[in-house]
Each structure stands twice: as structure tokens, then as C-alpha cells.
Image (cartoon, rainbow, N blue to C red):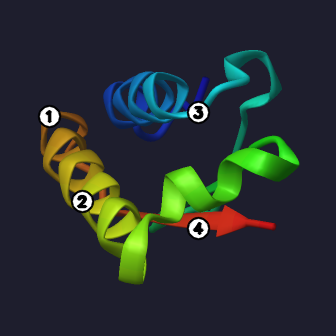
Amino acid sequence: MSDVAPTAEAVLEYLIKSIVSDPDSVRIHSSGDDRCVFSVTVADGDMGRVIGKRGRVANAIRTIVRAAAVADDAQIDVDFVD
């Protein structure tokens, strides 16, 4: 769990695990000092579900997690690693 933005990471994990078909393969790595970056890795067949058509699901996830990061008083980015 991230020390910088624990609420945002918990929301991100919940959203991703709700979308994918293999929730056990979800991995979230956090890095960065002043701006936290969450790198999300999922199973091979699940990346399409996470990104969605034209990236709409991915953008929605980023928006929700950034809103949750307000509670942590942190700025975050979410990257989806293939």
C-alpha cells in the first residue's frame, strides 16, 4: 500500500479488480515522490477490459482515482502497463 495516497490506491485496486476477469493477477506498483504514479498490471486478456473502447474506461478510472486522491492531499497519475 502506498504511503503517499492510500485511499486513492484502495479505490484503484477496487475498481480494477471489479472490472477484470482474473482479479488475483492485478498488481499495482507506486512510485514517485512529489507526484505519485500508480502502474497497473493485469492478466493478458484483461487489458482490453481495463482500457475500454477509445480509452474511456481507463480515463474514467483515472478521474475517479484522482478524486479519491483529494482525501490523501496528493497528486497522482495512473499508468496501465502492458
Q: Amino acid at mark 1?
A: Ala
Relative to 56, residue 66 above or below: above
**Nearest-to-viewer mark from 1 and 4:** 4
| Sequence-first tag of 1 and 2 | 2
- Which quadrant: the C terminus? bottom right
- For label 4, the residue is 79
Q: Residue 6, located in which quarter of the rendered image?
A: top left
Assess disc 2: are there few (<14), some (14-19) or many (≥20) residues with their C-alpha within 10 Å of its C-alpha. Answer: few
**Nearest-to-viewer mark from 2 and 4:** 2
Relative to 57, residue 22 above or below: above
Q: Determine the CA span between mark 1 and mark 2.
A: 18 Å
Relative to 72, residue 77 above or below: below
Q: Amino acid at mark 3?
A: Val
Residues at discs 2 and 4 in contact (Cβ within 8 Å): no
Q: Determine the CA span between mark 1 and mark 4.
A: 20 Å
Residue 30 in sight here: no
User: Is 11 left or right of 16, judged from the image as shown?
Assistant: left
Q: Position of residue 17 (x, y in %)?
A: 54, 24
Q: Determine the CA span between mark 4 and mark 3.
A: 16 Å
Relative to 40, residue 6 above or below: above
- For label 1, the residue is 71
Q: Secondary structure at mark 2?
A: helix
Q: Which mark is residue 14?
A: none
Q: Determine the CA span between mark 2 and mark 3.
A: 15 Å
Q: Which mark is residue 20?
A: 3
| Sequence-first tag of 3 and 1 | 3
Q: Secondary structure at mark 3?
A: loop
Q: Amino acid at mark 2?
A: Ala
**Nearest-to-viewer mark from 4 and 3:** 3
Residue in the picture at 50% in, 65% down: 51
| Sequence-first tag of 4 and 3 | 3
Assess disc 4: are there few (<14), some (14-19) or many (≥20) residues with their C-alpha within 10 Å of its C-alpha. Answer: some
